[in-house]
């Protein structure tokens, strides 16, 4: 019986050494997913505020200034159609060591209807 205990000594340490990095990577992935989700919400807010501003008839410069306050450093693409204004806002997010652009597109009826 003593021989069996001796062979099992340290097995918990080895198991922890194998499992702990996996758990750490999983937690890091969950945190990064939350960061991406938050940046997506920021992009959507910037796109929505800009689209509504343009739909009310404000100038493009005013709308871009509003987007810069909501999401500093965001890139905007503005598309005009006959009855809607669509804005795509992209913000930079970092997923681990990789920077990615997170876009969001919002359309608003022209004329503020």
Image (spheres, rainbow, N blue to C red):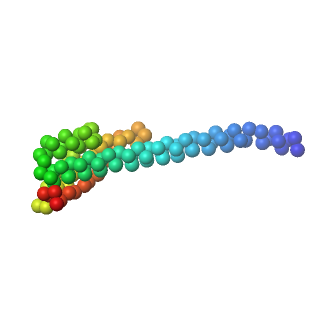
In this figure, what is the number of numbered marks?
0
Quadrant (top left/top right/bottom left/bottom right) for the C terminus: bottom left
The quarter holding residue 94 reads: top left
Quadrant housing the N terminus: top right
* Residue 5 x, y percent position in the rendering: 82, 42
> Which residue occupies 13% across, 48% down?
58
**Looking at this view, is 43 or 24 the one in front?**
43
Q: Residue furthest right?
A: 1
* Viewer-closest of 58 and 30: 58
Residue 7 percent coordinates (x, y) = 79, 41
Tell me if 1 is positioned left or right of 44 in this view: right
Q: Quadrant of residue 64?
A: top left
x then y, percent, for residue 16: 65, 41
**In the figure, is residue 24 to the left or right of 46?**
right
Could you tell me which residue is drawn at 64 percent across and 39 percent down? 17
Q: Is residue 110 visible?
A: yes
**Residue drawn where x is 17% and y is 45% of the image:** 63
Could you tell me which residue is drawn at 25 percent across and 39 percent down? 69
Residue 99 position in % (x across, y down)? 35, 40
74 on left or right of 109: right
From what the image shows, is residue 35 above or below residue 52?
Answer: above
The answer to whether 3 appears left or right of 57 in the picture is right
For residue 84, say whether it is visible. Answer: no
């Amino acid at each position: 019986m003593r021989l069996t205990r001796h062979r099992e000594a340290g097995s918990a340490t080895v198991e922890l050494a194998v499992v702990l990095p996996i758990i750490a990577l999983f937690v890091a992935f969950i945190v990064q997913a939350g960061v991406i989700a938050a940046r997506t919400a920021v992009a959507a807010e910037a796109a929505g505020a800009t689209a509504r501003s343009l739909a009310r008839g404000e100038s493009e410069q005013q709308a871009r200034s509003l987007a810069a306050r909501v999401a500093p450093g965001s890139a905007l693409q503005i598309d005009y159609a006959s009855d809607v204004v669509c804005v795509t806002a992209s913000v930079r997010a970092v997923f681990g060591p990789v920077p990615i652009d997170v876009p969001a597109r919002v359309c608003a009826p022209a004329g503020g209807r």
